[in-house]
Every structure is written in structure tokens, then in C-alpha cells.
Amino acid sequence: MKLSKEQIDNYTLILTEELIPAMGCTEPIAIALATAKVGEVLGEEAKHLTVRCSGNIIKNVKGVTVPNSGNQKGIEVAATLGLIGGDSSKELEVIADVTDDDRRRAGEMVSRGFCEVELEPDVPNLYIRATATGENHEATVTIRDIHTNIVSILYDGKEQLTGKDNNACTDGSVTFKGDRSMMTLDGLIEYAASVDINEVKEVLDRQIVCNSAISQEGLDNRWGAAVGKTLLENWGSDCKTLACARAAAGSDARMSGCPLPVVINSGSGNQGITVTMPVLVYADEWKVSEEKRYRALIVSNLVSIYIKHYIGALSAFCGAVSAGCGAGAAITYMAGGDYKSIGRTIANTLGNVGGIVCDGAKPSCAAKIASSVNAALMAHYMSVSQKAFHGGEGFIEEDIEKTIKNMGYIGKIGMKQTDVEILNVMIDKVDVDESL
């Protein structure tokens, strides 16, 4: 298919919007962004801080180490550190420049109950509302739908932000400028094959450099459960194992507080690492040209974004799966695969690991990444051998676009109650023994 200039520009915009650097897990960083901003708006020393979050935010911060925090965990830590040492202009690198004194003070303030955390019901899955109270004034900042999207700023109860200042729609929801509804698998493959690489080279180069660096850090040192290192130590270092290990190692480091930045995909650093490292490993193994590597990365990123946009930013669906689909699709693309063979790789991956659940950000995310990449590689080798799961088998359809939409429906609608129950278990809101 031949793309119009509007379609080409739209895909380029999507990539530039999505592929941005972030420090650590994006949920605690988004909390730190909200509190850094609320501190700037308050303009005086805060006496108390209240953070109200959606269940998905709580789920994704509970078990992850806050970067640059001195190995501390939790919403209270992220929020307090953002307030006293954050710089909101740095967005998802908001706490990159915190000091030892900031870390010490944050720990002391958290221990004496300075920050209060509450679950906010009936809000979007990505929702943070931070309120700082000082001696004379009060300020509130709200982020929703997108990690960097501040939709409301209140100072002494008066709104300081208008709709012109952000991406707010009339219904209060938020949208990117790039139109994800215009995406198709056929279209994104054509875009990857034909776009002038110079249009996206800068963002792709940044992704390669940042994500390779944190992956190497995860292999060089002991972070988290060391999933990546364990794979190489026990399974060898062939191309397939290295692809899984390099993706997992980046997550090993990131989930355990490594402060190195990651270029994200679909709002997630783990997904950003997953769409990057397996592609780079296979590009090196197959000695493909630099241009082919760039174009494969475009496929990987856009496939992940395409699948995930049907599901939403945060859900019970593990984003490593959609990112794994992207990596597998890109590897098939580098092998000379066309629309049909790339579609088979995606369907084969979803038909295998589409049910992996997200129970928050933590070290085991690295293992889920390794499993998803492994499934995507099996899917690729099945596809190039003309083997596939067929329409009518589970949620798989003959039309790959319908299969992707089916997975989106399951992830967004079908797993909605699953998401609630995962949170209930994580915060001890249910007695599991009595419920069985």
C-alpha cells in the first residue's frame, strides 16, 4: 500500500511522542513529577503531602525501587523525593539530580508520616492527585491518562491551568497528537520500509544508546533477581538466549532502582527495552545494514504501540507481551518477512502468552520479558516455516487485525475485574483462603 503524507507524518509523530527518556519505573516517576510540580506551585515549605492514586498506580509502585532514592521503595518515597528534590521541567527524569541530603531528608520525612497515600476510586487507570499543604497555602496537581500529562493545577482552590495548556479533551480525557486509530499493521510496515530514516534517526539512536546501556548494566552487575545473568550462565550465549537475556537484564536493573535512563514505549521502560534489545541482538547476529536495523526498530516500536493502544496505559495485561510481539515482528521483518509472515509472528505470540497478567512493577517483570521474547522468537521461527495458529482457535482470527483487536478487548474489558482482584490481593483487601 502507498501511504499519504498525512499517514506518514502521523506515524512519525507517534514515534516522537512515544520514544521519550524516562528514569526508573514510570509510575513512581510520574508521582514524583506531580509532587515536584505541586511543590513549585505551593511556593512555601510543605507541612503535609497527600497523594491519591488509582489502583493501577498503587499496583505499579508497591514493589519497585525508586531510582536515585538510595534503595527505597513506595509511593511515599517517590512523592516526598519529588517534592523536595525534583525538577518538573525534566518530566520523566524529574529526580535525576536529587542529592544525598534529599534522599536522607525524604527517608526521615516518610518515617514520621509526612506523606499520606489514598486509593482514589472511579478514576482512569493512570491517575495521580497530589496535594501539598503549607503554613498559608495549599496546592494540588493532577496527572491522568499519560504519565506526563498534568490536567489540573489548583492554588488555594483556584484552577491555574486551562485546556489550552495541555492535551485535555472536553470530556476530561487526554489524547496524544498522533492518531493511533489510523494505524494498521500493513500501514506501519509500509511506513517502516519507506520513511526517510532521518525523520526518526535521532529518537531511534537515543533508544539504542540508552536501552543498550541499562541492559549492559544489568548483565555486568547484580540487580534484582538477575534474570538476564541467570539465562546466560545456564542456557549459554546463542543468539536466541542473548535476545531474551539482554531484554531481561535491562529490566533487572530498572526495576531495582538503577538510575540510568530508558527510552520508553507505550509509557513503559520495560516495553521500551523489550522492543529494542532483541532486535539489536539479531541485527548484530545477521549483520544487517544500519538502515535495515533502523527500519526493523520502527516495526518493533510501532507494532507494540499498535497492540497496546487498544488496551490502554495500565491494565491487568502484561505489556511485555505486546512489546515481545513488536520484537518478534521486527525480527521477521529483518529476515525478509512480508505482511503475512509478520502477522503470523504476532498471532503466534499472542496465541501463546497473551494471558500473562500484570501484578505491578517489580523484579519478576524481567522474567515475564524473557518469557515474552522467548515466545516471540518461537513465533518467528514458526512463521518463517509457514506454521501458524489458525482462525477459530481461541481468540485467533484469520485476519491479524481482528486478532489484535480481540486481544485488546480481552486486555481492556475482559481483564478489568482481574485487575481489581490483583490489587485486592496485593493490598490484602481480601482473605484468599476464605474466598476459595
Image (tube, grey):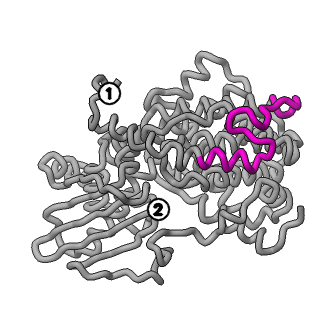
Q: Is residue 97 visible?
A: no
Q: Quadrant of the N terminus?
A: bottom right
Residue 260 x %, y %: 48, 48
Residue 244 x %, y %: 64, 31
Judge from the rendering whether residue 46 lies leftward or rightward of residue 88; answer left or right.
left
> Alpha-carbon neighbours of circle 2 within 10 Å: few (<14), some, or many (≥20)?
many
Q: Does dot 1 land on a helix, a strand or a loop? A: helix
Q: Residue at left 81%, top 65%?
A: 196
Query: Image height check: is 91 above or below 151?
Result: above
Q: Quadrant of the C terminus?
A: top left
Residue interval drawn in magenta: 382-409
> Looking at the image, which is closer to me, 208 or 164?
164
Q: Earlier in the sequence, mark 2 or mark 1?
A: 2
Q: Residue at left 36%, top 49%?
A: 55
Mark 2 is on which residue type? Asp
Q: Label 2 vs label 1: CA separation?
A: 33 Å
Mark 1 is on which residue type? Ser
Judge from the rendering whether residue 372 lies leftward or rightward of residue 114; answer left or right.
right
Q: Residue at left 40%, top 42%?
A: 257
Identify residue for label 1. 435
> Looking at the image, which is closer to me, 277 or 101?
277
Does the magenta run of residues contain 249? no
Which quarter of the picture shows residue 32? bottom left
Residue 145, label in figure: 2
Does the magenta run of residues contain 388? yes
Q: Mark 2 or 1, which is nearer the eye?
A: 1
Q: Is residue 70 visible?
A: yes
Query: Image height check: is 266 above or below 411?
Result: below
> Alpha-carbon neighbours of circle 1 within 10 Å: few (<14), some, or many (≥20)?
few
Q: Does dot 2 land on a helix, a strand or a loop? A: loop
